[in-house]
Amino acid sequence: MPSNLESDQVLEKLREFAPEAIEGTQIFRKELTIWLAPANLLRVCEFLRDHPALSFTYLSDVTALDHYPEEPRFETVYHLYSIGMNQRLRLKVRLPGNSPRVSSVVPIWPGANVFEREVFDLFGIVFEGHPFLERMLLPEDWEGHPLRKDYPTEGYR
Amino acid sequence: MPITLEKVPGQEEKVILSMGPQHPSTHGVLRLVLELDGETIERCVFDIGYLHTGFEKSFESKTYSQGITLTDRMDYLAPLSNNLGFCLAAEKLLDLEIPPRAQFIRVLLTELTRIQSHLVWLGTHAIDIGAMSVFLYCFREREEVLKIFEMVSGQRMMTSYFRIGGLALEPPLGWLKRVEKFVKKFPERIDEYEALLTRNPIWLRRTVGIGTLTAEQALALSVSGPSLRGSGVKWDIRKSQPYSGYERFDFDIPTRPEGDVYARYLVRIEEMRQSLRIIRQAMEGMPEGPVKANAPHIVLPERESMKTSIEALIYHFKIVTEGFHPPIGEVYQTIESPRGELGFYMVSDGSPRPFRCHVRAPSLANLQALATMVQGRLIADVVACIGSIDIVLGEVDR
């Protein structure tokens, strides 16, 4: 179980490094979530991975949320894990509904490749700098992005 | 053809080989596109999605209790592990305490699932490489485990036995005797598999030094589970972030530093032995008591109490017709499935249906490592490498 002490330590280090990058924080069921400004994503991720006391070297997962019809509509969600600290961390980036784009974290964690492709496929979020951003689960001529909340679940298109 | 390899300009033309999706050694419907120079692999790209069923979308239109049945069908070789991950995520969202007896039974059954899944892996991996008899032996023992599942839950594969708040029902009398019989017999069966393979010169030639993955590469590519431990990283979620009472059990995490196909084979063989240890401890320390949490608005009431108590009847009606309302929030619950880190990211907006339920599939992440493993190797090694990462395409595609 991650203690609150370790969550505090992560937050403290991040506030020291880039106070302007943090848009908000939340702790729910002992899980720390940090909202980041899209422009600072890569810089903060690199810091989290390379800082010797934090060393979030393992990227567990990348996914997204659709808050339709609210704005900003999309959120990309990153789950990091630090084997040394035995601590998990959730990063979120808010994106607009109109042509959502965010930097790819593949240069930092190569394992993000398939997860970002999946999000691109099912949510239509574009990851800039991704080496091979193609549809992965759906056929390449598929129309629409099924995990969006306005995608019809029944009837004809 | 959906996924192809584009020609590199200025380079002489290479042979492009499409392997799968019907190839028997691709364990389902995986298609690989290989660029070959002679028989040496220069590049490898995978093409998946043949089994995409949209489970994550389906979760959003089902209540939390109904969602459990979908989880069985993702990783169909480890249904109980998936049930457990989903239930733990929902229980974390609800902040629900599970009675110790239910926790012990959950641990026991998920470890049996791990053995069962590893048996299918060993059998198919061996048959891919050409050892036919191991396959038959493995399926003989797997049958025993499936019979235990059938006895407990009524189903051999799509168990849906773990429910939010505990178990579906108390296991039948005498089920532990059956488990005991299996546990007594199984260690010598593992020795039997090892006698067939571990020192077999053909097996060694096909696996030692093949598909090497260093610890740094594995971590960077988000590889987890036995495939990561075969590269020497000692990380097991059962130890690092224990769930369902795993902290009460004494077991080792097997690792091998080599990172080749043989190392991953040894790690999984040893994991089966460790799972047996956990099962024995769970049987010995099995507590008495209820198998469902005391949370009448979440857990369905007993049939008998519905006939005698109006509250039970009302709760039953509410749960079945409407479901329950978890607090607004989000959780990410991970478990160590037979394939690695299985994560459920569950977001609640306070309604009886999950706002979003995302599954972090260990098979999908592990599949990424395949290109690194087969780089510069021969086509025959691809077959050994696919077997050694133990993917289930139902989980990769979801």
Image (cartoon, helix red, strand yellow):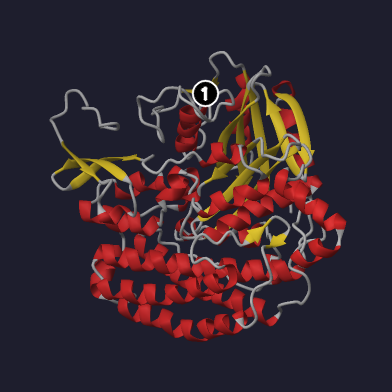
Residue type pointed to by label 1: Ile
- Total residue callouts: 1
Task: Give the residue drawn at x 32%, y 71%.
Answer: B135
Q: Examine the image and state in which quarter residue A141 appears.
A: top left
Residue reaching furthest top? A98
Q: Examine the image and state in which quarter residue A13 appears.
A: top right
Residue A16 visible in the displayed image: yes
Residue A53 visible in the displayed image: no
Task: Give the residue drawn at x 61%, y 16%.
Answer: A96
Chain of residue at mark 1: A
Instruction: Check the picture and name the quadrant holding the N terminus of chain B.
Output: top left
Estimate the x, y position of residue B265 in percent, counting from the top left: 39, 66
Estimate the x, y position of residue B340 in percent, counting from the top left: 52, 55
Q: Is residue A134 left or right of residue B255?
A: left
Label 1, residues with CA under 10 Å away: few <14, some 14-19, many ≥20: many
Q: Is residue B240 above or below residue B366?
A: below
Task: Give the residue drawn at x 26%, y 64%.
Answer: B129
Q: Is residue B116 left or right of residue B47?
A: right
Q: Which residue is mark 1?
A: A125
| Nearer to me, B278 or B72 | B72
Task: Give the residue drawn at x 29%, y 32%.
Answer: B3
Estimate the x, y position of residue B178 in percent, counting from the top left: 55, 82
* Label 1: which secondary element: loop
Q: Is residue B365 left or right of residue B100?
A: left
Q: Is residue B26 above or below residue A131?
A: below
Residue reaching furthest front? B307
Estimate the x, y position of residue B40 in percent, counting from the top left: 19, 47
